[in-house]
Image (cartoon, rainbow, N blue to C red):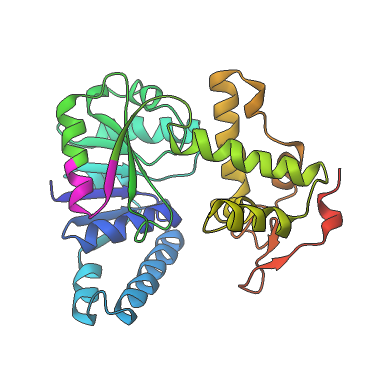
Amino acid sequence: MNRIAVIGAGTMGNGIAHVFAQFGYNVNLIDISDSNIERGMATIGKNLDRQVKKEQITEEEKATILGRIATTTDMAKGVSDRELVVEAATENVDLKLKIFKDLDANAPAECILASNTSSISITKIAAVTSRPEQVIGMHFMNPVPVMKLVEIIRGYATSDTVTKNIMETSRSLKKVPVEVNDYPGFVANKILMPMINEAIITLYEGVAGVEEIDTVMKLGMAHPMGPLQLADFIGLDVCLSILNVLHDGFGNPKYAPCPLLVNMVTAGKLGVKSGEGFYNWTHGTKELVLADNFKK
């Protein structure tokens, strides 16, 4: 495979397009608006500049990588000759189902359809297509150009051939693919999100403050960043969405989102993307938010 399409030019989508282009793939980056695409391409440019500064690539290689990425707002046209499409839209089940119906109608019959979903059932996504055996999960980690892991999620009908193909494709990107089965949250978020939720509950119950909770997990458990800071990076709305998928999928109260998380998302406090979550990111650096904001 060489011809790739990526649906969505946001944080995950532009990172996925960047990595595919860096390793020689011809990429169509697709989004619903020119402004989204412009922001996505600007991010790719900045990330490539970092790689140049670190002497990981040259200026000439940067230009070559950017030259491998074409952009469009016309999804039907953008996927019409592709061999693999990776969907990286918002973590919303109805949106993803609509996208996959459209992809199924417009992508070539032999094209593999992959989703970067972090929690939504691949089997459910595949069921709206006429090619469920060619639908698979490719869950990249953020930031995509840096993180090595790709969770490869087999749906109920995903074929062995497609799974092998996507495992090999992931390795060609210098990633480490790990095959998992299709259950809510897969592996990464089935383990991570309850931990983040428990950290939020610990804050909500007044056991400790934001900085104290994160410090305990960093210094005591050797985590590179605390769970509350990580939640801010992921996006509190995304955390809430994944917890709801886990709660609905397993029916276990241990996955019920903390009321504080629900309230923060309702108030638009989504973390880095909104400028404030458990920390204030308005000035581009991490600052503590007033403790009174997190009281019951």
Q: Nearer the viewer, residue 264 or 68?
A: 264
Residue drawn at the location 72% of the way across and 36% of the way down: 258
Residue drawn at the location 60% of the way across and 53% of the way down: 220
Residue drawn at the location 20% of the way across and 24% of the way down: 159
Let me know if residue 170 is in the magenta part. Answer: yes
Determine whether, in the image, residue 279 is placed left or right of residue 174: right
Image quadrant where one finds the C terminus: top right
Residue 153, compared with residue 2, is above or below; it is above
Residue 53, compared with residue 210, is above or below; it is below
From the top left corner, tell me how far across and down residue 67 is, in percent: 21, 69
Residue drawn at the location 76% of the way across and 37% of the way down: 259
- Quadrant in the picture for residue 169: top left
- Start and end of the magenta stretch? 168-177
From the top left corner, tell me how far across and down residue 151 is, in percent: 34, 39
- Quadrant in the picture for residue 49: bottom left
Determine whether, in the image, residue 266 is placed left or right of residue 146: right
From the top left corner, tell me how far across and down residue 129 is, in percent: 30, 24
